[in-house]
């Protein structure tokens, strides 16, 4: 009986993490949609700028990895679990804030500052998750790499479009 309750709790927890992360992703997508087809198209882009269709599948995959990683840490009875999940929540909020600054407000400069803070939070989450659950930490590596690339892209867009 207790094993069934534990399994049910685990499944519900995973579903909650996936839904929570995809809701944040969806809100970011709505914000992005406000200017990706107009303002963003008008920006001068660096040669390494990916085509627009790349972003949605990459971000969706990253958010699912993020959810699974968070869920794996949530399941662990580890002394630093609460701190790790708090940093996880902070980086999730910072990720959404970047979309608001870059696409919503169209402030490449503020988004550039914010993405550095976001990257620090992601790396911190990765390290904390790794210490609790190696797979959870590993699931954050693509996120670190993608946001590192996004930081380079954000900086290049800022330099190319200073008015």
Image (cartoon, grey):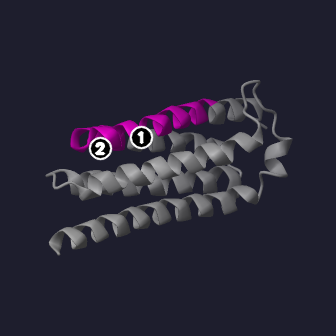
Q: What quarter of the picture does the N terminus occupy?
A: bottom left
What main secondary structure does the magenta stretch of the protein show? helix
Between 81 and 119, the one lying in front of the other is 81
- Residue 53 pos. (x, y %): 75, 43
Q: Is any part of residue 105 visible from this angle?
A: no
Q: What's the distance in space between the residues labelled 1 and 2, CA to CA?
A: 8 Å
Magenta-highlighted residues: 123-152
- Residue 35 pos. (x, y %): 78, 55
Q: Residue 140 carries which label?
A: 1
Marks 1 and 2 in Cβ contact (< 8 Å): yes
Tell me the residue at 16%/72% (across/down): 2
Q: What element carries label 1?
A: loop
Between 81 and 160, the one lying in front of the other is 81
Q: Earlier in the sequence, mark 1 or mark 2?
A: 2
Residue 132 on the magenta segment? yes
Q: Is any part of residue 8 visible from this angle?
A: yes
Q: Which mark is residue 76?
A: none
Q: What quarter of the picture does the C terminus occupy?
A: top right
Give the residue number, with chain letter if any, for mark 2: 129
Q: In this view, does 69 lie above or below 10?
A: above
């Amino acid at each position: 009986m207790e094993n069934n309750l534990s399994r049910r709790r685990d499944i519900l927890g995973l579903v909650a993490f996936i839904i929570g992360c995809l809701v944040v992703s969806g809100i970011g997508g709505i914000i992005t949609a406000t200017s990706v087809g107009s303002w963003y198209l008008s920006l001068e882009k660096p040669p390494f700028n990916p085509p627009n269709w790349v972003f949605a599948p990459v971000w969706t995959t990253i958010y699912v990895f993020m959810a699974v990683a968070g869920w794996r840490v949530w399941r662990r009875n580890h002394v630093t679990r609460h701190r790790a999940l708090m940093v996880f929540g902070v980086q999730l909020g910072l990720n959404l804030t970047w979309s608001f600054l870059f696409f919503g407000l169209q402030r490449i400069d503020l988004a550039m500052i914010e993405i550095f803070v976001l990257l620090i939070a992601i790396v911190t989450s990765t390290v904390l998750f790794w210490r609790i659950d190696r797979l959870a930490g590993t699931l954050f590596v693509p996120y670190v790499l993608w946001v590192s690339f996004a930081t380079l892209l954000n900086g290049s867009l800022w330099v190319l479009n200073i008015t």
